[in-house]
Amino acid sequence: MILSNPLCFKILKTLFPGLLIWWLISSCSTGQLPELHPYARESVTELENRCLGVFLKKNTQLVHALGIQLPGKHRSSVIGITNVFPREKTLESVIMSVEGLVLFHARFSEESKEVFKSIDPFTSEQFSEGLLRDIQLIFLKPDGNLMHSGATLNGTEICRYTGKNQIIDILLPESGNWAIKKYKNKSLIKSIQASDIGTHAGHGLIGYPGKLVMKHSGVFGYSLEMKLIRMEHIK
C-alpha cells in the first residue's frame, strides 16, 4: 500500500480548494487530429515498440510534486503518489497536503474501484473517475487497437490507437520528448508532454521523464504539472 511508505508524507503546499471544479470540466477544444503519412508495413512493428516504450512495464511507485494551474492565475501544489501495476492494469493513487493530510486514496482496476479515503473536495464520484482516466492515459498502454502509424509533415512519428469513441496518439518527435494526445470527434481534449528524459537523481532509472505536463483543452481547461521526486520498482 502507498501509505506504508514514509516518503509519502513529504508535501509541498496546501491544496487550493477550488481544484475539483477544473479537474472535472471538459469542453470544446481547439486542437485537431493531424494527418499521418503511413509507414511501410515492415516499419510499423518497430515504431509501435518504440511508442509503447513510453509506458511502464514493471510494477512501479512514482512520487511527483503536482502543480495545478487553474484558469486565471490560480495555482496549487500537492504531492501525488502513484503505484502502477501494468500487467494487472491496476493503479493506486494518493493525493496529500503539506501537513501530511491524506486528501484522497483509491485503488483502481479494470474490474473494480475502491476508495479508501476522500475528503472535500475529493468526495465526488466524478472526481475519482476523472482521476482514473488521467492516470491511465499517462501510465498505461491504450486499450484500443493500433489503427495507423506513420509521420507528420514535420517528421514527428505517431502511433494512433482507436477505441471507445476516442483516438489516442503517441508522438515521438526527434527531440525525444514524447507526447500523448487524446481526441474525441477528432478534436483534442487532453495532451501530455514529457520533458527532462533521462537519469534522475534518486531512482537510477533511464528513460523516464523528470517532468510531465497534462493539459485539458477548452474554455475552462487547466494544466497539471508533474515533477518527478522519486521512482522505484515495487512488488
Image (tube, helix red, strand yellow):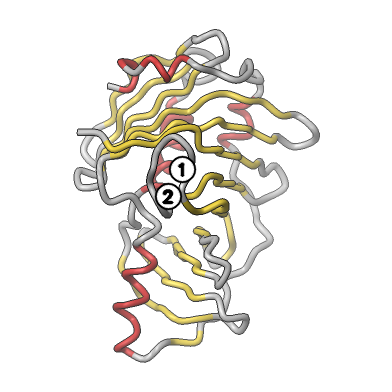
Q: CA distance from mark 1 to mark 2?
A: 5 Å
Residue extending farthest bottom:
40
Badge 2: residue crowd in 10 Å (few <14, some 14–19, many ≥20): many
Q: Quadrant of the C terminus?
A: top left
Q: Residue at x 29, y 78 (%)?
A: 45
Residues marked 1 and 2 touching at CB (< 8 Å): yes
> What is the number of the mark on residue 134?
1
Residue 192 visible somewhere in the drawing: no
Q: Residue at x 62, y 68 (%)?
A: 32
Q: Nearer the viewer, residue 175 or 135?
A: 175
Vertical arrangement, residue 195 with respect to residue 105, above or below: below
Residue 67 percent location from the top left of the image:
63, 32
Q: Residue at x 34, y 34 (%)?
A: 61
Q: Quadrant of the N terminus?
A: top left
Label 2 sits on a secondary structure element that is helix
Label 1 sits on a secondary structure element that is helix
> What is the number of the mark on residue 137?
2
Question: Label 1 amino acid?
Answer: Asp
